[in-house]
Amino acid sequence: MAHYAKVVNGIVKQVIVADDDFIRNNPSSEGEWIQTSYNTRGNVHTAGGVALRKNFAGVDWIYNDSDDAFHAPQPYNSWTLDKDTYLWNAPVSYPDDGNNYNWNENEQRWDSA
């Protein structure tokens, strides 16, 4: 069994667990099924295996066909996509003091949560 993302026009519409035979024998009438790995995040396989498509797909995520990568939608206009990890980076690093913060897009800073 593996995870598959149903991708329609570059957008993930559904993520399922299925075997390869099911995917081969039930082609999508709209879009395509693309395998995704539950253990992949930031182009690293958390169980020590080979990373698959940069990140585990989520509903409404984007599939970049040319780079064969899944990534979340851009959370804020100021954030940039890291092309190695396909994770979004804020223009200011998250504070490393153990506290929780929320991004303030207007002020371009992290505010205490």
Image (cartoon, helix red, strand yellow):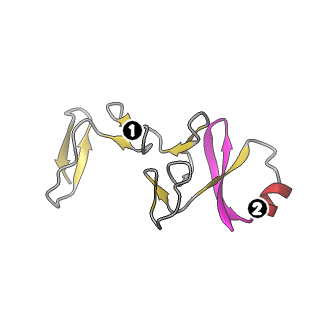
The image's mark for residue 20 is 2
At 74% from the left and 65% from the top, the residue drawn is: 19
Which x, y percent locates residue 1?
69, 68
Q: Position of residue 66 (x, y in %)?
A: 60, 33
Locate residue 14 relative to residue 31 in the image: left or right: left
Farthest right residue in view: 25
Q: What residue span does the magenta drawing correspond to? A: 1-19
Seen at 45% across and 43% down, the residue is 86
Q: Residue at x 56, y 53 (%)?
A: 52
Q: Quick check: 54 left or right of 110?
A: right
Q: On the image, numbered disc 1 is attached to which residue?
A: 82
Q: Is the C terminus in the top left, top right, bottom left or bottom right quadrant?
A: bottom left
Asked whether, in this view, residue 58 is left or right of residue 3, the answer is left
Q: Residue at x 72, y 64 (%)?
A: 18
Residue 96, position as x, y percentages in the image = 17, 54
Q: Amino acid at mark 1?
A: Asp
